[in-house]
Amino acid sequence: MSVAAHQPVPRRAENPVAESRDLEAFEHYLTSPQGDGHVPLGAHTVRAEGGTCGDTVTFSIQTDGQTVTDAGFVADGCGATHAAAAAAVALVRGASLLDAARVGTVAISEELGGLSSAKLHAAGVACDALHRSLGAAVAEQGALAPPLQGERTLVAMSGGVDSTVVAKLCAAQGETVAVTLELWADAENDAERSCCSATAVSQARAMAQALGLPHFTLDLRPQFRNEVVEPFLSAYAAGETPNPCVRCNGHLRLDAMLDFADRLGAATLATGHYARVADRSGPAGPLLQAAQDETKDQTYMLSALSPASLARMRFPLGGYRKTEVRGLAAAAGLPVADKPDSQDLCFLAGTGRDRFIARHRGAAPQPGEVVDEAGHVIGSHRGHELYTVGQRHGFTVASGEPLYVLAKDGARNRLIAGPRERLARQAVTVRDARLHRAADRVDRVRLRYRAEPYPCRIAEPVTAGNHAQLTLALARPADSVAPGQIACLMDGDLVVGWATIAAA
């Protein structure tokens, strides 16, 4: 990529002394900025913005796959931003990709002689642009050789306590590199509560570099919108209740990081998920195994991972309880030891599902009819997207008994309601099934995240592989089986397959 045109001339600082504790160092980069307006041939170019001055930095990196052979920038903002971008160019030109990934806000500030707290944001914007360009360069062109001794591990860091403890554990065992994905940007998104915002990326980078680790930013925002958010919106429009986290983990996020690991010469990818891996030596590939801490187990959210991906993954926290992980963080003096866990979907943090759907579909949910199983109109609702199977409240019906959502008709914007006993299903149809072992291995199914598994069997005697449709025969009836949710197929505490729940 390249910069089409030079941006406006940056605004110079009125009082350079207030910008830096070492005026000489600052003036050097302000008056003789290296790489200003320069776009190397074949460069990987990205843009970052932020800061109190509305700064922007467009950063370009040229690489031979192992080192930064050239770099340049275009900046628009205060004098400190211009100088910080020039300092970033000086720090990474000629450096290996791993050494360049160790350059952070602190290093840029120190190169300028130490920015004042009021101007430290300039180093942050330059650093964001630098690391996005590094991530793009590695993703497209990286070709690092494995270390001469031992293995290199790539750690997925979100900036929370779990991934930070994993990074520290891995670093104690061998060469470790960190990566954070930037997946979503939205004016209404609460950046502090989201694990994939630009704010989360900068916090994760600071933590990784405090541990002495190189850190890369991998910007997947367009892919995340196309492959996760758009299907999420489409599924709700069709009357389903989707689970975007399973799709993200199984088809985008972790596979992208495994590809990134290849580019970095890393043999394995480690994450802070609470899960384990079993049967690593099995001829059909490894399987997910539930974590020791059942209250934190995340195998449901990881169920769409292929055995080929699992073969290269490590889950160091699978044998720990959450309280033990926080204890490890506290003992190591990590500032994230007491950081709260993320609760919302990353792209819903700070906004409600209803408003999100309305904003990103371009139209708000519309009122519609509530009907009984015979099709008779018995009430009204605020928009079918706002409800899920099993829900009792939020719609108006003329009935002397409590009624529940039994099904949704997205095409006609209708809810089908009835008494609670009509929710019970002892046979569940699933679509797009993927079995890693033969059907006779399945003895239970988890139909919702955190829900208790139901004893079951697959009615069809099929072998491992892909199957368009299967029937799950449950040993006892299940309530609130929502089309669009994932059916995690299990053999004891092993995940042997997954599928999507189809409409009844």
Image (cartoon, helix red, strand yellow):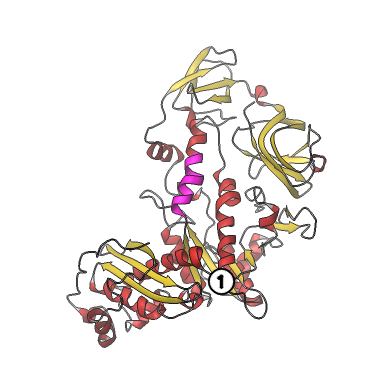
What percent of the width, then of the height, locates residue 134? 45, 68
* Residue 375 on the magenta span: no
Q: How many marks?
A: 1
Which amino acid type is shown beneath numbered disc 1?
A: Val
Quarter of the C terminus within the rendering = top right
- Would residue 1 be seen by someone viewing this image from the given angle? yes
Which residue: 62% across, 68% down?
327
Residue 324 point in image, percent of width and height: 66, 65
Give residue 157's quadrant in the image: bottom right
Asked if residue 45 is positioned above or below residue 357 in the image, the reply reads: below
Which residue is at 21% across, 64% downward?
Answer: 8
Residue 246 x/y as whole percent: 59, 47
For residue 17, side relative to residue 223 (left or right): left
At 34% from the left edge and 78% from the top edge, which residue is drawn? 87
Residue 446 vs 201, above or below: the answer is above
> Observer-nearest residue: 107 or 395?
107
Badge 1 crowding class, 10 Å Cα cut-off, few under 14, some 14 to 19, many 20 or more, is many
Q: What residue is shown with label 1?
A: 177
Q: Front-most of 211 and 147? A: 147
The magenta stretch spans residue 229? yes
Residue at position x 42%, y 64% in the image: 132
Q: Which residues are magenta?
A: 220-232
Which quadrant holds residue 407? top right
Res. 204 in view: no
User: What residue occupies the far left of the structure in this picture?
Assistant: 14
Residue 364 in picture, x, y percent from top left: 38, 32
The secondary structure that most of the magenta stretch takes on is helix
Q: Secondary structure at mark 1?
A: strand
